[in-house]
Image (cartoon, helix red, strand yellow):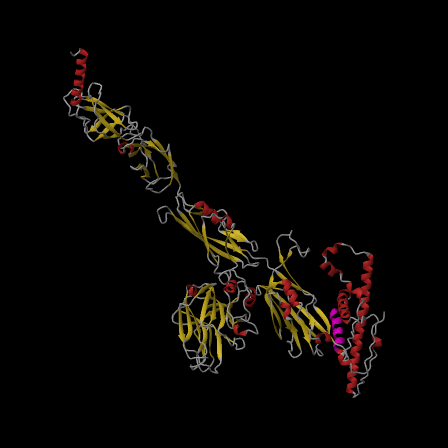
Amino acid sequence: MLTVAGVLAVVAVCLSAAHSKVNKHKPWIETSYHGVITENTDVVLLDPPLVALDKDAPIPYAGEICAFNIHGLEAPFKAVVLNGTSGEGQLRARGPVDCETQKEYTFIIQAHDCGSGPGGTEGKKSHKAVVHIQVNDVNEFAPVFREPEYQAAVTEGKIYDSILQVEAMDQDCSPQYSQICNYQITTTNTPFAIDRNGNIRNTEKLSYDREQQYEIQVTAWDCGQKRALHVVPVRIDVKPVCKPGWQGWNKRVDYEPGTGSKQLFPKMHLETCGGPLSSVRTTVELLTSHIGKGCDRETYSEKSLQKLCGASSGSTDLLPAPSSATNWTASLMTDSGKDSDLIFSFDGHQSAKIPDWVVPQNLTDQFTIATWMRHGPSPGIRAEKETLLCNSDKTEMNRHHYSLYVHNCRLVFLLRRDFTQMDTFRPAEFHWKLDQICDKEWHYYVINVEFPAVTLYVDGVTYDPYLVTDDWPIHPSQIDVQLTVGACWQGGEVTKPRFTQYFRGSLSGLTIRPGKIESQKVISCLQACKEGLDINSLESLDKNIKFHFNPAQSILVMEGEDLENMNVAVRKVSYINSRQFPTPGVRHLRISTTVQCFGEDTCITIPDIEAVVMVLQPSEPMITITGLERQNRPASDLRRSEGVRLFQQLHIISTVTRGDSAAHSTDQRQGLLEEIIHNLDYCDILVLGEELRPNQESLQLQRSSLLGKHLDATNSTSGMSVYGVDSMANYEDVIREVRYSNWRPAHLGERRFRLTCSELNGRYTSNEFNLEVSVLHSSEVGEHVSQTVALPQHMQLVQHPAIIDEIYPEHGLGVPNAATVVIVMCIATLVVVIVLGIYRIHLTHKQEVKLSETTKEGGETWDDSPLSITINPMENLQDPQADEDEVSEEEDEDEEEEDDITSAESDDSEEEVDVQLPRMQGTKRLKWEKTAIFY
């Protein structure tokens, strides 16, 4: 029998089995949902709607939906069941949703049925579905301007496309509400307008006189038509008309010679009138074409310059200064007025024949031709050749052996080699086409020939010929050749020999050097300018400034992006002239500037400016040569092989006049002369009177005296020339070694020489220092007996007070004591007695000469007995030369003490005795004792 408990247990098991058979299916939802929620609301609008279906319906609980579960990382949403039977649900926000914080959300959702009871026990889950939710924006923010205020400046009289741009922003997240769609000027009656992008422009030309500043109010709207809560003020300043250009510069800059580098524009700056710049390019030009040969160069002679630059020796100057020895240039037009530059002008009618003794006979395969040339376009017929240098047949034929000429602004060098080994074509004509040939400016041309190669240097830059033509070599002949400058000689194949192919232009320093070619270093030295542009403190120049000099440093180009850096760079531009005595006068300056703006080629135009550098006149040096102006030398000294030194006590000094009275002075009485040191470029020793007779006399200089110096020397019967750029001290050393020899001085009474020195090729010359050498003759047996009375040696130290005062001006401040006065008076008395004695000797000698002549006329026979001479006991026989000097000094002093006896008389009497001594050796015995002076 079943109990009640057992029955209940059976019923429960049966019911459970029944329910498990009812909830057979899982709920079903869509696989994905897209929803939209507007910020600040809580309901999400889903597409499709949130609905869960269950096939177990209409079974209670098993067919009903109890919940929607959301799986996601902190998703601010929840899902609620609106109707469990129909399965409808809804997504809601847990709190306020802000689009500005997050615009989109993505998460997972699942549906649950109720299972076996209201609590969803043993319920089933649907599959997982993806939900995408977008947050819609609400126009909750108003536009706000980025700046609290705006300010700009404009120049009067201009219409601007955009003066400045204002900009507002909106914090809304969507494009519709975050973008600014419109700006508006709220201030009325203003000459300004604003576009949708916030650019403000003026609608009419503004006037500084009418209004110097405008203040306007601007507002903004976003695309949702929400207006800014606050307007922004905009201030626009009106400036007077600005003229772009350089400001703060002087029209004239004075340059004091010897001051080194001087800034040209220490306060200059570029005014761009406020425009933004992307780059600035400034060019500074120094215009010196009117100075010398294109710029301030050293004006030493061509030989001196070559020596200074280390050029090879052996060059021949074809255009030297006209002189008696170089007279072939006398007929040419010269222009020597520019700082002693020797320039020859050719107008198509001048030419010069070079003497045969000057022309190098064999150029060899290596030689150099150099010249300065200024040439312009040829007038008239352009086919006419213009010859600088031509070596052609003198007669019979018209062959050109070598020549240098200009043809149609092309430089052509012709070189026809003689036939030597084989009869073949060889390079003969070398052509260069250069702008420099016809630009009417000075250029230095050097042609280096290393046959068959020929190289042209123009201002130190190398140019290869663009055209080389070949020709047959010239067959040897016995016809003489003629070298000409300025034209070509046509001596054959014409009825009358004549010059042809005349040159039109200017030449200077035309030289030819056979056997050697010049290096580029020497060529650069020979044509180097001594003035140019410079940059002070180059190391402090901003690294972003790019600069470039041309080779002559006459053009400086600077580029930079920053205006202030460019201003600083221009202020550093300087002028420098390294010459000690520069050519005075004006140097023109030109500054040109181009400016580029962002996105434009040129935005403003900067006018060129022109200024001048005034090189002031340098203090002119006064070169003074001093030394012993009279020498009395025994004939035996002249006969020696080494001769006698002429200028052993030579001194060369140079002084300038200074305006500063505080400067050290070489002469306190003048108080303005200051001794300076500079170079000399030549010293000439000229023989006065009859030229030297080569068979018996000469000037001599040992070559060893020139070693280690930039000096050389030439010698002739008219004198000697020492030349080269070197110091005054070196010139002194060399000239002191010049000797005079005369190996047959029997009939020579005196020789006179004149010494002059020069700086800068004659621009500054010294005084003319005259030297007289008197020959003291002896008897035939070689005795050197002086007929002059010499003072004791201790008396030779006494000099005239005026001389002492001039040499030692500080000594003039003392008062001589009584003993000194007595000594001077005694010496003066002694000098008078001596001179009177000499004068009596002179008279007695004349009488004896007359007596001898009378005896000759009477047919008397000369007595060949030796001459009896009584020597003054006080005469110094060991040093006749010193005695001669003493007598000369005594006679000079006596000239100021005695008015009735002149120094000329003393000199005449001395010369009479010296010259006549040899002639009296064959006369009768004379009693000279009666003329002896006793003390």
Q: Quadrant of residue 875?
A: bottom right
Q: Which residues are magenta?
A: 901-915
Rendered position, 199 above or below 910: above
Is residue 671 rendered to the left or right of residue 510? right
The answer to whether residue 351 shows anywhere in this view is no
In the rendering, at what x and y percent does residue 337 appear?
53, 64
In the rendering, at what x and y percent does residue 783 appear?
78, 77
The question of residue 913 being in magenta is answered with yes
In the rendering, at what x and y percent does residue 181 appear?
28, 34
The answer to whether residue 793 shows anywhere in this view is yes
Residue ranking furthest to the bottom: 859
Q: Nearer the viewer, residue 699 or 34?
A: 34
- Give the main secondary structure, helix, strand or loop, of the magenta stretch: helix
Is residue 292 rendered to the left or right of residue 865? left
Q: Quadrant of residue 75?
A: top left
Q: Nearer the viewer, residue 317 or 813?
A: 317
Residue ranking furthest to the front: 1
Label tally: 0
